[in-house]
Structure formats: C-alpha cells, structure tokens
Image (cartoon, coloured by chain):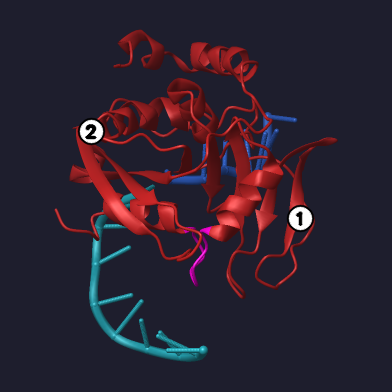
Chain colours: A red, B blue, C cyan
DNA sequence: GCGACAG
DNA sequence: ATCTTGTCGC
C-alpha cells in the first residue's frame, strides 16, 4: 500500500482541515492484539535537509527480559524532503517517508511508538495519531518537548507524571522517564488509552529518557548511526 | 496585534 | 531536525 500523493501534498489550510476531519476517526480505547512486536519510528535529515531519512526498528516484546528487547529488524528509507517543518503539520512532512521504511518490514508490529505527539495536538492529530490511522495500528506518541496543552510541574522521581490538558480534556501526560532529566510528553495516538500508553512506555524504559523503541529508531534515523 | 510552536 | 568540542557526572 502506498500513499496517494494528493493526501500529503496539501497547502497548510487544507492540511489543517483534513486533520480536523481525520481526528474524528481516532479510537481512544484499547484495541490491541497480543503484543509480540513493538516498532519504533523516527525521522532524520541529510544533505542540509534535502533528504528525509526514515528509520523503523522492530523489537521483540519479552516481559522476561524487558526493558532489554531483541531487535528483529531495522529498516531505513530515504526520499526527497517534500515540505518544510510547520508547527502542527509535522505528519505531512514525515509520514510519507515513514511509510517507506514500514513497507520494508517483513513482520507487522502490534504496537508502534513514534517520536512526536499523539493526540496532544491543536486538532488532536499529531504524527503518531495520523500514522496510527493510516496503518490502522495502535500507536503511542512520545515527544521530547511540548507542542500543545497545559500541565502542572512533574515530580522528580522516575515514573512520576501529571496530566496534560487542553481545557478540561486530558490529551496526554508529562512523564518523568528518568530522574533529573527533562520529562517526555506521552499521548495516545490510535486504538489505545493514555493509561495503557503510559504502561507500555514505562515497560520499555531502560535507564534512559526514551523508551527502547523510540531510542533505537532515533539513533538509526540520526547521522550518528552508520550510513 | 503579540507570542507559541512536535521535529 | 541540524550545525558542532569539549566537558561534567554517574
């Protein structure tokens, strides 16, 4: 399955309108198959931004060894960057490339962790939510900084968290994934609740700030990794 | 009109 | 995101 170009090649005005419509199709309740594999997705750039590099890492979920998980596959896909970064429209810039990497996997995951927001977005369609709808898979967004929403200060202990609000609506959580380090923003994308999202993120947390799937994908997408 | 603003 | 060296701390 490849993405119709017109779905991603939209003017900001149209892209925002589409986000509002697509968000209505999100399922914010748990609908996950037994988790055997978890995928981590992230995007990087090369050539001064001209090339978009998508990375996906497939990990085998094993509660006996977690948070140490075996890497089953890791794919990289490159393509010309199609649009600049515009706050709130990240999915239109990153998802096409991410799909390219995803299509190379020989095994489909039951859960996907994405570097970015889930529903913690002005129109409730961050990159993780958008990707979840497209793949029809449960997704969780783990962002390193805030895009939208308000929250109280988070405790300093590992595992402490506070709700992220958009008015009275809870759109995510600010989680202290590691003591003494800036917290991460966790929000459900599709087919999962915030509570379940937090559970999975914490279960995949090693001694680092980011959960293993996202941490490994981040490394693979960055130029820091091999080339 | 003035900020804020995932990656 | 990316451009970039060394440096402080567990």
Determine the chain carrying the residue at label 1.
A
A23 in the magenta segment: no
Q: Secondary structure at mark 2?
A: loop
Of A110 and A168, the residue lying toward us: A110
Counting residues from the start of the chain, the first of labels 2 and 1 encountered is 2
Q: Which residue is mark 1?
A: A162
Q: Which mark is residue A18?
A: none
Of A97 and A84, the residue lying toward us: A97
Q: Separation of disc 2 and disc 1 at Cα?
A: 37 Å
Image: magenta residue range = A204-211
User: Residue extending furthest left?
Assistant: A227
Asked if residue A190 lies left or right of residue A93, the reply is right
- Total numbered labels placed on residues in the image: 2
Give the residue at x 27% y 44%: A45
Q: Name above or below for residue A63 compared with residue A57.
A: below
Q: Position of residue A16 (x, y in %)?
A: 55, 18
Q: Which residue is mark 2?
A: A104
Give the residue at x 23% y 33%: A104
Quarter-of-image position of residue A126: top right
């Amino acid at each position: 399955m490849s993405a119709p170009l017109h779905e991603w090649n939209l003017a900001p005005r149209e892209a925002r309108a589409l986000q509002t419509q697509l968000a209505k199709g999100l399922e914010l309740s748990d609908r996950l198959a037994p988790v055997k594999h978890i995928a981590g997705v992230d995007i990087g750039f090369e050539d001064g931004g001209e090339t978009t590099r998508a990375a996906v890492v497939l990990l085998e979920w094993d509660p006996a060894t977690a948070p140490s998980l075996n890497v089953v596959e890791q794919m990289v896909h490159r393509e010309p960057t199609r649009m600049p970064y515009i706050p709130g429209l990240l999915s239109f810039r990153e998802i096409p490339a991410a799909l390219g990497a995803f299509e190379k996997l020989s095994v489909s995951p039951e859960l996907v962790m994405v570097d970015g927001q889930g529903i913690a977005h002005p129109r409730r369609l961050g990159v993780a939510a958008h990707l979840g709808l497209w793949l029809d898979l449960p997704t969780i967004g783990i962002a390193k900084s805030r895009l939208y929403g308000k929250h109280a200060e988070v405790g300093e202990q590992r595992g402490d968290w506070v709700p992220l609000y958009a008015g009275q609506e809870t759109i995510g959580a600010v989680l202290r994934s590691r003591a003494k380090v800036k917290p991460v923003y966790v929000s459900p994308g599709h087919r999962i609740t915030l509570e379940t999202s937090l559970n999975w993120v914490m279960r995949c947390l090693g001694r680092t700030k980011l959960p293993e799937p996202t941490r490994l994908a981040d490394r693979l997408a960055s130029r820091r990794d091999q080339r």
